[in-house]
Image: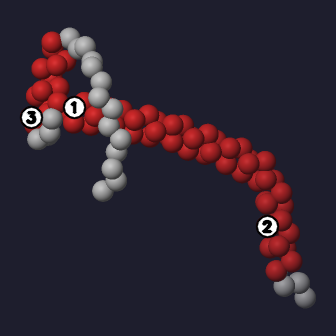
Amino acid sequence: MATREIARVTVSLPQKLLELADQLAQEWSTSRSGAIAELLEKEERARLEALMEEGYRELAEENRRFAEEIYPAVSEMTLRATEWAEPPDD
């Protein structure tokens, strides 16, 4: 397991959020700090996933445009290849 550098910080939270942090810590069998760290890690993963989704959508759009651009040429080549493959009429 990789060792993480830990920084000690002081954070002020509304009482309701502090109670939620304590509840999550108990449910997840960790400390309050562990629960808050887990929540922040989940947010980090969610942001990365959103960034990846955006990239995949952009790539899909780029691929669609490319396919539209080359479709006429590929169609023409396919048609000609089919014509060349047909035996001549005797």
**Dot 1 alpha-carbon crowd within 10 angstroms: few under 14, some 14 to 19, many 20 or more:** some
Which of the image's four quarters has the C terminus? bottom right
Choose between 5 and 61: the one closer to the eye: 5
Element under disc 1: helix
Q: Amino acid at mark 3?
A: Gln
The residue tagged 3 is 26
**Numbered disc in front, either 3 or 2:** 3
Whether residue 46 is visible, yes or no, is no
Residue situated in front as seen by the camera: 90 or 44:
44
Question: Percent position (x, y) of residue 70?
Answer: 79, 53
Colouring scheme applied when the structure was drawn: secondary structure
Q: Describe the element under mark 3 as helix, strand or loop.
A: helix
Q: Quadrant of the N terminus?
A: bottom left
Q: What's the amino acid at mark 2?
A: Thr
Circles 1 and 2: CB atoms closer than 8 Å: no
Residue 50 horizontal/vertical position (percent): 46, 36
Occupied quadrant, residue 33: top left
Sequence-wise, the earlier of marks 1 and 3 is 3
Point out which mark residue 33 bears: 1
- Within 10 angstroms of label 2, few (less than 14), some, or many (20 or more) residues? few
Question: How many labels were placed on the picture?
Answer: 3
- Point out the residue furthest to the top here: 14
Q: Is residue 15 left or right of residue 74?
A: left
Image coordinates for residue 71, horizontal then vertical, percent: 76, 53
Q: Nearer the viewer, mark 1 or mark 3?
A: 1
The residue nearer to you, when weighing 64 against 80, is 64
Identity of the residue drawn at 11% across and 41% down:
29
Q: Which residue is mark 2?
A: 78
Q: Residue lying at the far bottom in this picture: please name it.
A: 90
Give residue 43's position: percent from left, percent from top: 36, 32
Q: Identify the mark nearer the N-term, 1 or 2.
A: 1
At 82% from the left and 80% from the top, the residue drawn is 85
